[in-house]
Image (spheres, rainbow, N blue to C red):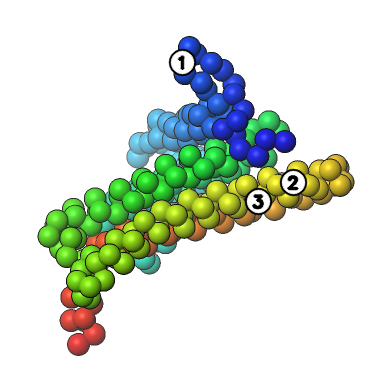
Amino acid sequence: MELTPDVIVLAELGPITLNATIVNTWIVMALLVGISWLVTRRLRPDVPPGRLRNALEVLVQMIEEQIGAITRDAVHPVMYFAGTLLLFISAANMLAVIPGFRSPTGSLSTTVALTLAVLLAVPIFGIAHRGLGHWLRSFAQPTVLLLPLNILGEFSKAVSLSIRLYGNVMSGAVIVAILLAVAPFFFPVVMQLFGLLTGLIQAYIFSILAAVYIAAAMADPHAKLEDKA
């Protein structure tokens, strides 16, 4: 059993090799775009909302409330970014229950790419909200002696986010493979349901951590000190 979708080659177009990671990522993106189009194509005041639209509105409201509990700055822009991460990772992990579909989050390249997107978003949000000077000075807080450690801390975020998501998806695949050899009928079904639950939890944790890092970059530590005083 292949543990990573990177080794599953689906097509070769000359020098371009399309593995399961690339193809399944496109499938997840196409599914999310298609659902969004179906929901918003009749988004008018005179058209009553359907069940799918109501369900998605509840989901968006829940995400907005979670982001609002983390930061009061630029709630909607942060929600657009963190919510997109949540929906993509959740959809990718949920589709893993379909026989033959390998979740792209089971590839280290996908989790690293998602983490790099978070690491790029953190300074972008921080600079846009506080300015370049304030963001650069945050690395020298509370003292310039901690500058190397603060820079190292930014890279540690990349390692923790990518390894956490990749490790949980991979561990689920390994456990299913082991139980499939022991009891090929009952245990894989249970583990698929368990993997679905852990996949949703990991999507939530990843997106919330991304929102926390962005909120920290936008926060003004001097304002917090003034509030406490």
Label at residue 202: none
Decide: is 217 above or below 96.
Answer: below
Q: Position of residue 205 (x, y in %)?
A: 49, 58
Q: Residue at x 77, y 50 (%)?
A: 190
Q: Give 3 or 92, whichever is nearer the viewer.
A: 3
Q: Give 94 or 142, whichever is nearer the viewer.
A: 142
Identify the residue position indicated by label 1 in the image.
15
As helix, strand or loop, the secondary structure at mark 3 comes to helix
Identify the residue position indicated by label 2 in the image.
176
Q: Amino acid at mark 2?
A: Val
Pick the quarter of the image with the C terminus.
Answer: bottom left
Q: Give 213 or 34, whichever is nearer the viewer.
A: 213
Q: Amino acid at mark 1?
A: Pro
Decide: is 53 above or below 142.
Answer: above
Q: Dot 3: within a 10 Å radius of its alpha carbon, few (fewer than 14), some, or many (20 or more) residues?
A: some
Identify the residue position indicated by label 3 in the image.
171
Estimate the spatial distance between the alpha carbons at disc 1 and disc 3, rounded to whole Å: 32 Å
Q: Residue at x 12, y 60 (%)?
A: 133
- Residue 219 position by quadrant: bottom left
